[in-house]
Each structure stands twice: as structure tokens, then as C-alpha cells.
């Protein structure tokens, strides 16, 4: 770097190359995106170039370089999070687009035809749960099954219904 | 553009440069500030009882410490404008030590002010004077720091404005005939905290962008 200060272009290019290697190692631990990393390395090299009159070659080079790198990295983070905030949706706007997830267009009655086509005890289990409002435990007692067998049967029925409805 | 190409571009532009030295720069800046204070005093005049006051140890200590604060803040501001604090980060504590000693002297003066000296008829006018006196040195310091590469924007701005404040306070202390120490503390020196905050804000907002 001392030769670079004296105006030696080759020495300066070498110093920047060595700096870029150090910077990549330093930033790799902090950034996962390779493009962002290279952009930031170049930004730091510009800062090094602009600030080279503050380095006299008599002091250790790394503290000087990493002070600039850390400063530019913080700047990058500030911009990054500011951009994310700018792109974020306003809560008021979000409210205009939300819908009540508890209200579904699908009701037991609207897909009763599909339910009746299910095999074995599945239609009766779904009828008891969704039409009559019984719990899995109550259905198990009524149908003389274990509670877990009712839940498994209902789960399989939902899966079959989902596949049928999506394919439609 | 890939980094190798980018490095070749940057290195093709360089010319020999003369590295900056913060110690030499701060000596020059302090010298210029003292010259500015001398000009202010030549214009507004020294306090009429200056010869008598120079026999007062506490007054001389106060003025000397203001000069020390001026130099210490100027030096610290110059150092803080280097990314690695010029390898002398401990020197940034110099203004704190100077301010600490200054507070001790002021406390001593407060104890010695018995019976209390009569308060002047004015109050906030002193603060306005100090602000006006300190504008030029503060701006000069901020301008100088902006030409370097501070990585501590707030701190640099704060120290630069405190340098200006010290010069304004010193000029006023040598020109205004006031001995009421409570007035001096309230209207001359306590506003330094406000100045420090303004400096921090200015530095953070405008330096090294």
C-alpha cells in the first residue's frame, strides 16, 4: 500500500486484490447472497480508494481497511432494511384484502354428494361430525370404534375429498 | 462489472498523494481558531478588568482549561475523521479528561464565590453570543472532517461542534465582564450538552455521505 500511495498503479492493483480477498472472507460470514457480497466488496473498494489519503503506510493496514468495511457494511444493512420497510405492505392496506378464514364457501351440504361417494364408514363419520356436530369421541362411542380410528378415517376422508375437489 | 475489471479501473486512475496527518492538521486548525478568537477580541475588546483577573488563579485556570478543551476537541475531532482513529483511539478520551478538570475548576469557583458576585442583568444573550462566535469554527471543522473519511459520523460531528463551542466560550469569557459564576455555568457552559447533541445530529446526517 505504501508504493500505492506513491502512485504505483501495479502495487495499488495488487493491494486492492489482496483487500478484496480479505473482504470476501469477512463478508462471507455475514452475507449469503453472492451477488450482494460482490457488490458490497466493490463498494468498499471505492471507499478505500476515496479514503486512501487517510492512510500513510506507517500504520497497520488491516484495522484501517476493516474500519471502512464495517462502516460500509452497516450502511448496506441500513439501506437493506430501509428498502424492506419501503416495500412492506401497510397494515391498513392489508386489512382491505383480508377475509375471514373461518368462513368457507364449502359446507357439508354443498359437498354432500362427494361425501356420500366415499367408501366404508367415512360418509357416516363425516355426517356425524359436520352435520350433527358430534366430537370424535362421541362418534367413536356411537359407531363402536376407537377414537383414534375415527380420527384416522376422517383424516383419510378429508384427503380424498381434497383431491377430488382440487381436480374439479 | 466483475471485481477484477473494477480493480483495474480503479488502479488506472491513481496518482501519488500526500497522506494527511491529524496531529499537524489539528495544530493548524487550533492555531487558526486562536487567531479567530484574537480577531474577535480585537473587534469586541477585552474585558476592562483583564489585568486584575489575570491575578486570579481560578480565572486563569478556567481560561487555560478552555484553551486545552479547544485543542483536545480539535485533536480528537481530527483523529475521529480517520477510519482507524489513526491508531490512537485512546486519545479520544483527551476531551473527556479536559472537561472533567474544567468541571472541577468550575465547582471550585462556585465554592470560592462567597459572597456571590452580583448577577448580570442579561442571561440568554451570552448563549446567543457563544453560538454566533462558534458558528465559523464549527463549520470549518465540519468541512475539514468531511474531506477525510470518518467512520464515526456522530462522534466527529459532536467533537467538531464542541471545538467551535470552546472557541466561542473562550472568546466571550475574555471579553465579557461577568464574575457571577452561577450565570457563567448556566448560560456559558451548560449549553455545551445541547451543542454536543446538535453536533452529533449534524455529523450523523451530513458527514461522509
Image (tube, grey):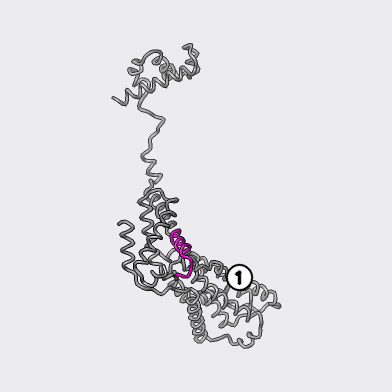
Name which residue lies at 37% across and 44% down. Answer: A93
Front-most of residues A163 and B169? A163
Residue A113, placed above or below residue B126? above
- Secondary structure at numbered mark 1: helix
Residue B40, placed above or below residue B189? below
- Label 1: few (<14), some or many (≥20) within 10 Å? few
Instruction: Tell me where residue B139 appears, x and y as whole percent.
Output: 45, 73
* Secondary structure that dominates the magenta span: helix
Name which residue lies at 35% across and 22% down. Answer: A161
Front-most of residues A145 and B188? A145
Query: What segment carries the magenta color?
Result: A57-71
Q: Is residue B68 left or right of residue B5?
A: right
Name which residue lies at 40% across and 50% down. Answer: A85
Instruction: Tell me where residue A30 appears, x and y as whole percent.
Output: 44, 51
Name which residue lies at 41% across and 44% down. Answer: A91
Q: Is residue A109 left or right of residue B129?
A: left
| Residue receiving disc 1 | B97
Amino acid at each position: 500500500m505504501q508504493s500505492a500511495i506513491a502512485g504505483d498503479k501495479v502495487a495499488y492493483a495488487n493491494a486492492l486484490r489482496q483487500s478484496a480477498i480479505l473482504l470476501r472472507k469477512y463478508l462471507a460470514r455475514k452475507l449469503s447472497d453472492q451477488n450482494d457480497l460482490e457488490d458490497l466488496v466493490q463498494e468498499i473498494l471505492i471507499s478505500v480508494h476515496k479514503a486512501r489519503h487517510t492512510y500513510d503506510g506507517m500504520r497497520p493496514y488491516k484495522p484501517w481497511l476493516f474500519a471502512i468495511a464495517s462502516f460500509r457494511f452497516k450502511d448496506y444493512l441500513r439501506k437493506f432494511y430501509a428498502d424492506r420497510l419501503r416495500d412492506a405492505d401497510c397494515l391498513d392496506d392489508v386489512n382491505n384484502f383480508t377475509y375471514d378464514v373461518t368462513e368457507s364457501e364449502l359446507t357439508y351440504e354443498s359437498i354432500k354428494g362427494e361425501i356420500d361417494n366415499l367408501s366404508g364408514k367415512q360418509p357416516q363419520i363425516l355426517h356425524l361430525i359436520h352435520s350433527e356436530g358430534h366430537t370424535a369421541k362421541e362418534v367413536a362411542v356411537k359407531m363402536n370404534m376407537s377414537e383414534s380410528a375415527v380420527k384416522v378415517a376422517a383424516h383419510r376422508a378429508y384427503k380424498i375429498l381434497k383431491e377430488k375437489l382440487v381436480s374439479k | 462489472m466483475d471485481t477484477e475489471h473494477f480493480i483495474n479501473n480503479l488502479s488506472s486512475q491513481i496518482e501519488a498523494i500526500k497522506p494527511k496527518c491529524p496531529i499537524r492538521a489539528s495544530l493548524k486548525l487550533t492555531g487558526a481558531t486562536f487567531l479567530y478568537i484574537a480577531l474577535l477580541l480585537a473587534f469586541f475588546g477585552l474585558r476592562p478588568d483583564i489585568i486584575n483577573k489575570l491575578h486570579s488563579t481560578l480565572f486563569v485556570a478556567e481560561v487555560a482549561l478552555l484553551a486545552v478543551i479547544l485543542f483536545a476537541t480539535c485533536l480528537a475531532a481530527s483523529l475521529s475523521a480517520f477510519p482507524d482513529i489513526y491508531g490512537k483511539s485512546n486519545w479520544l478520551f483527551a476531551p473527556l479528561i479536559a472537561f472533567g478538570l474544567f468541571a472541577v475548576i468550575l465547582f471550585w469557583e462556585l465554592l470560592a464565590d462567597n459572597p456571590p458576585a452580583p448577577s448580570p442583568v442579561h442571561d440568554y444573550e451570552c448563549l446567543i453570543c457563544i453560538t454566533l462566535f462558534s458558528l465559523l469554527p464549527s463549520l470549518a471543522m465540519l468541512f475539514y472532517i468531511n474531506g477525510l473519511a470518518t467512520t464515526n459520523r456522530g462522534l466527529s460531528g459532536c467533537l467538531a461542534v464542541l471545538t467551535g463551542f470552546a472557541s466561542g466560550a473562550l472568546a466571550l469569557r475574555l471579553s465579557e465582564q461577568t464574575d457571577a459564576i452561577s450565570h457563567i455555568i448556566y448560560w456559558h457552559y451548560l449549553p455545551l450538552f445541547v451543542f454536543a447533541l446538535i453536533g452529533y445530529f449534524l455529523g450523523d446526517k451530513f458527514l461522509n455521505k
